[in-house]
Amino acid sequence: MPTSVDSTRRGGTRWAWYRRWSRPLGSGVLLLILLAILAACTTGDPQDTLEIRSDLNGKIYSLYSLVFWLAMAVFIIVEAMLLYSVVRFRRRSGDGLPNQIHGNNKLEIAWTIAPALLLVLVAVPTLRTIIDTNRFPAPGPDVVQVKVIGHQWWWEVQYPDLNITTANEIHLPLGKAAVFTLESADVQHSFWVPQMGGKMDVLPTRSNRMVFTPTAAGEYYGQCAELCGTSHANMRMRLIVHEGNDFNTWAQKEQAAAAAPTDQVRRGQQVFLRSACVGCHTIAGTNAQGNIAPNLSHFGGRTTLAAGILPNTPENLRRWIENPAAIKPGAKMPAFGELLKPEDLDALVVYLESLK
Ligand code: CUA
């Protein structure tokens, strides 16, 4: 029949193609998988949770290591037994139906008790770590209190004891315990600086607390870890751990009034105070006392803007003020490029950058 001859020929061609290409394709895929696995071996990534930079992360890492190596031991034993059984009891030619058995009480008791013991081995250190990481030091000179409030889509940072309010950049002294109070002004967020410790929910309905002591100076990256709307991915933060007296220097600068203004700065301040800016932002020492957007009292001293997504340069600031939503989708700040004259925008940028 012509149709079956046709289909046989088509099938034959298809299999020839498969025979020709299966090996090179298979090797290519294997190589890609191997490369992906090897990529996990890099170190020094800014958000690597396995880089320990606080006591809290150290405690989490110890627990993680214990669970990892226990799971590894179980994996190796189970896989070894499986492979042994596959090879040793494989079907050979001439074999009939194997012996049919029903259950094995001794084995079943053993493989019920063994995992239970393993779970106890994991549970005891887990409970100890939970209790240990929820021990909060009494307030005092060696403890820094930080209140972090999540907003769509930025972080408000307050130091109640130091009378400082800033945004998106948390400064801490090396080696002192930092006690965080975490709250939200709107929806659920999650506070996460991977090298300092695990995530913690930031909720509108309750205060969560977290404590850690940074063990290495440096700049660390953090971000919101709970889907919270359009610009969730743009809700970043920096944590700066200072050595020696640098934290006090920073705090004193934040507490002091900004330097004496130039004409351009004065003009920028006028623009700020007569525009919608004052409805949302606070600048210490002025009539601007809004609290639904970041406090800008020392904006010029920050390294980034728009919740850590852009370096704080006059060009970026101008771009941001002109049209925030073009940089951070869903941003609630209006596009001032349409509301202000270009000269006023220039003065505004100079004024804000002068607030060191
Ligand atoms: Cu805030 Cu995601």
Image (spheres, grey):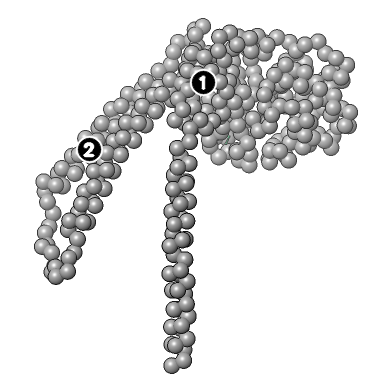
Secondary structure of residue under mark 1 = strand
Q: Quadrant of ligand 1?
A: top right
Distance Cα–Cα, label 1 vs label 2: 37 Å
Q: Which residue is drawn at 59% across and 12% down?
A: 247
Q: In this view, does 291 lie to the left or right of 140?
A: right
Image location of residue 19, percent across then percent down: 43, 69
- On residue 180, the disc is 1
Which quarter of the rendering shows the C terminus? top right
Q: Residue at x 14, y 70 (%)?
A: 94
Establish if 143 lies above or below 276. above
The residue depicted at 60 percent of the width and 38 percent of the height is 232
Characterize the local packing of mark 2: few (<14), some (14-19) or many (20 or more) Cα atoms within 10 angstroms. few
Q: Looking at the image, which is closer to me, 143 or 3?
A: 3
Residue at coordinates 37% horizontally, 20% vertically from top-left? 132
Can residue 53 be seen by looking at this rendering? yes
- Classify residue 211 as left or right of residue 118: right
Disc 2 designates what residue?
116
Which of 78 and 123 lies nearest the eye of the viewer?
Answer: 78
